[in-house]
Image (cartoon, rainbow, N blue to C red):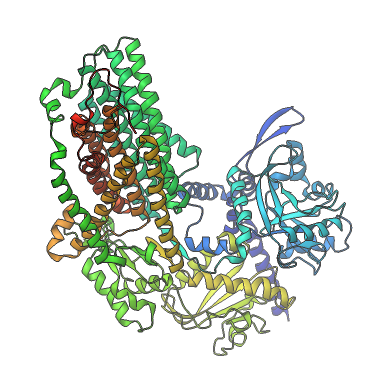
Amino acid sequence: MALAMEAAQAETDYEAARAQIASRSLSSDEVRRALRLSDEGKRLFDEETKEQVKLPSARQRALDRLREDYPDQQDRLDTLLAKYQEYESIRTTLDDPADLERLLRASGVLSFRITVDPGTVPEEAQLRADLQEKGPRAARTPDMAWFKLNKIDGWYNNAQQLAFLSRDPVGFFSGRDYIVEEYNGEYYMLAWDIRGSKLTPESSRGWKVSKAFQGQDQLGRPAINFLMDPRGATLLGELTEAHVGDSMAVLLDDEIYTAPNLNGRISRNGQIMGDFSPTELAYIIRVLNAGSLQNKLSPAPISRNAIGPELGLDYLKQGLGAGIIALISVSLFMVVYYFRCGVIAVVALGCNALLLLGAMSTLSATFTLPGIAGIVLTFGMAVDSNVLIFERIREELREGRETKAAVRLGFSKAMSSIVDGNVTNLIVCIVLANVGTQEIKGFAITLGVGVLTTMFSALVASRLVFNVLLELKLMKKIRMLPSSIPAVERAFEPGVNWLSLRWVFIFVSAIYMGLGVFMIVMQRGEMMDTEFRGGTQVTLQFKTDDATPEEDDRLTLTRQEVEDRVVAIAQSAAPDSPLADLASAQVLPLDPDSSGVRSDRFMIKSVVTNEQAVIESLMVAFADELDNRPPLTFAGQRAEELAQAPVFPLSNPRGLLGPDIGRPQYLNDVSEFAGGVAILLENIDPATTKEGLEARLNRLREQPDYSDTAGRTVEIVVLEGTDSAVESAVVLVSDEAIDYLQNENIWEQDLAQREWDLLRDALGQTTTLASVQSFSAAMAGTFRAKAVVSVVLSLMLILIYVWVRFGSVRYSLAAIACLMHDCLTCIGLIALAEIVYKLPAAESIVATLGIQPFKIDLNMIAALLTIIGYSLNDTIIVMDRIREMKGRLPYATDKIINQSINMTISRTVITSGTTLLAILILYAFGGEGVRGFAFAMLIGVGVGTYSSIAVAAPLVWQRGHTEQDNEATPGTTITTT
């Protein structure tokens, strides 16, 4: 008996010692809760000092409390905080697109609940005690429940109120007729959970928020105003009318944002008040406005576009690097060719860049690959305007005008060409911004802002610099390379009879256009990328070679080796399996070595729309090369209902595992988890490590939608296999606040179902590959329609603009013919590039020139429309000079046309040359993400320069009208009809 008493006392002492140690141990859950709080400080009025004081942020206050509670853990906490801040500075909103998909399915749920007044319910004290002991999910009655306050910062208005709240939170909220209790550093409010005292999507179906927008609360702080639809207005009116004088909490995703007192009936209008940052305000408004589509969201996205951080960073660095090189190269050319005028152009270019980046910052735009392409193209086109002005100034100087007059006339005469060229580009940008996808809109907005800043910098900034230098007599003479070296000037004024070569031009253009038509007929759907056909595009990036980890060398394969594995997947698939279509998948090495076929990164395009099947099959086929976790399957994984799932309560009196899970052979002691849940994982495929299973579960518990499961005791017991190759296992979970033996319903809802959902998500997920794009057939059809509308609408608007601007349909039709010529030629050469890429004999040429099997995608459509705008810009320069020289004459004669081309050839070559230089740099150094766009632009700008001379100008001339037709004797009045 004495021995038993000693043993009992020893056990009691051990438990007490362990509890004391545990109380002094800083848990990861406490730190995680503190780091999730806002890091933004708040300024409040101090009524005692009558001054504004800055208070520490909610995160800082929580961390300070942890330092006070765990003084011996301060060094560890500081180290952890430093690492978290470093991580937070570079992380995105979410770490994986799969997390975003989960959150989207349950975000933006608005609800209303009447709050419980202090002293009105006898269960108040017990509910407060239960909250501290069991947590908010278990501390409830059938009529009442605890709901978390979104931000405590929104509930006090001055430093004295904050001090009162910190000292006595119960008294602080009781004085405002709320029942609020603090739990683990967060505040929870008690509200009714019965019909007649709440309005939620579950209690009353068929209502929604029709509109949400920004407003102001009574203190002038930003707030969110919302309007209910007719049914929602009726239900909200009934709720508020029955509870006039009470407080009503407004909840978003079950978190209380505000709880105003009801002074009367509220139906259609409402307001959500709180301490919102601008980002939070915009996000909540977007979520509420999207709520009207909530019931129409499909379980799986119809389109998905994800890119891994490493690949995205590579693309971004390459794009920004190309932009910097293009800027420097174009600037050097301008200084070498135009001397001091070139320096002025560089100043204007710098002004342009500052204005463009400032506008992007104001619009909260981010750097995307299409956006960077738009910036690089802006640099090339910004120089065009300065070239037009400088060439006009040079012409005036050559005619003997003084410097001031030459500058004034140069700007005056170049203005029409600059405005016309930029307006046509702006038309294309407006069309793209209205009917394009988000990526294309980014390009269109960037280029559109660039067009506006280009006109400002060329016509205002450059002119201002010229005026200052001339007034201060710092520029008495203007010298340029052509005026210094006569040979250069003669080279740019060839004196060619261009119209006499029109038959040669017709023959060459016929070949170009014929090639385009032939390739369109020959390739047909093969020319289209997955965005227009539907399908999946995956980028694989291989892991670091374990043999040379210190050199950070990655594993590499050849294109043929990758193709063989992809084809093998298709051959092993069932005939009716979607994976059978992988046999025709296209494999493309990215950034290959000198051979052009070996790389550590490959893009695989297929028409298979089942994205998950493609990813899973590729991860298995390239398991040795990829550093990713594959999805895991196990018996019973697809069970939606808990009754059919391998989920069991731990209720065995002896604390043995086997009887509880129906496997009596396992006699593990699980008494520590009594009242918890056991989830059985049998036939895990592929076998994984115990550490890997733990990492998957822990990672998901840190995500916002599973944050309530943090702090639970979890253990994984391996049943079959080893820790390094788990074939079957059981996951044990217990929660101090939830016990199966005390309340089976709460156990099932808040523990069993929650853990089952978490485990299925954790094991069913795969890490995102370097890049994944998928488009359903419906989305592809939408993209095709948008592309057609973009092209047709752009051509129509440009035709109308040119017609109005030049006052003749002949000029308009000539411009459209020129654009059709350029587009067909560009499409033909894009298709030809794919054919050349597949030729074994052309491998060395393909590798040297960086040719890829380019296809028509949304970026390529943007390139074609940009080509339309740029080609028209070139054409307008020539046609504007023809119009100027024609004056009031009824027709443009052959002499006028030839002379106009010869006079504009210098600026045509220089403007096209600077743009080609910028695009060539983008093609060579911008990376794979923009190479297709740059390829199309290279062809388009080159062919557009040719067509403005060889196609548009001859079409403006009318056969039979020569110089003599327009000659008039002095005093003769020329009448046009």
Image: 530 above or below 909: below
Q: Left or right: where does residue 210 sit relative to residue 368?
A: right
Image quadrant occupied by the N terminus: bottom right
Question: Which one is in front, 841 or 200?
Answer: 841
**Is residue 542 visible to the viewer in this orientation of the structure?**
no
In the rendered view, tell whether residue 587 sits above or below residue 816: below
Q: Position of residue 505 (x, y in %)?
A: 16, 46
Relative to 796, say whether 717 is above or below: below
Examine the rendering and report whether any part of residue 464 can be seen: yes
The total of numbered circles placed on residues is 0
Please state which of residues 434 and 241 is positioned toward the viewer in this rendering.
Answer: 434
User: At which x and y percent is residue 715?
Assistant: 55, 72
Q: Nearer the viewer, residue 19 or 335?
A: 335
Where does the image place residue 502, in percent across and percent down from the top left?
16, 43
Which residue appears at 44% of the width and 67% of the height?
Answer: 776
Would residue 533 be found to the left or right of residue 850 on screen?
Answer: right
Residue situated furthest left in the rendering: 487
State the residue at coordinates (38%, 32%): 419
The percent position of residue 467, horizontal first and vertical second, equals 36, 16
Identity of the residue drawn at 66% across and 77% down: 674
Q: Quadrant of residue 801?
A: top left
Q: Nearer the viewer, residue 35 or 795?
A: 795
Occupied quadrant, residue 307: bottom left
On the rendered image, what quadrant is the C terminus found in? top left
Q: Is residue 116 left or right of residue 66?
A: right
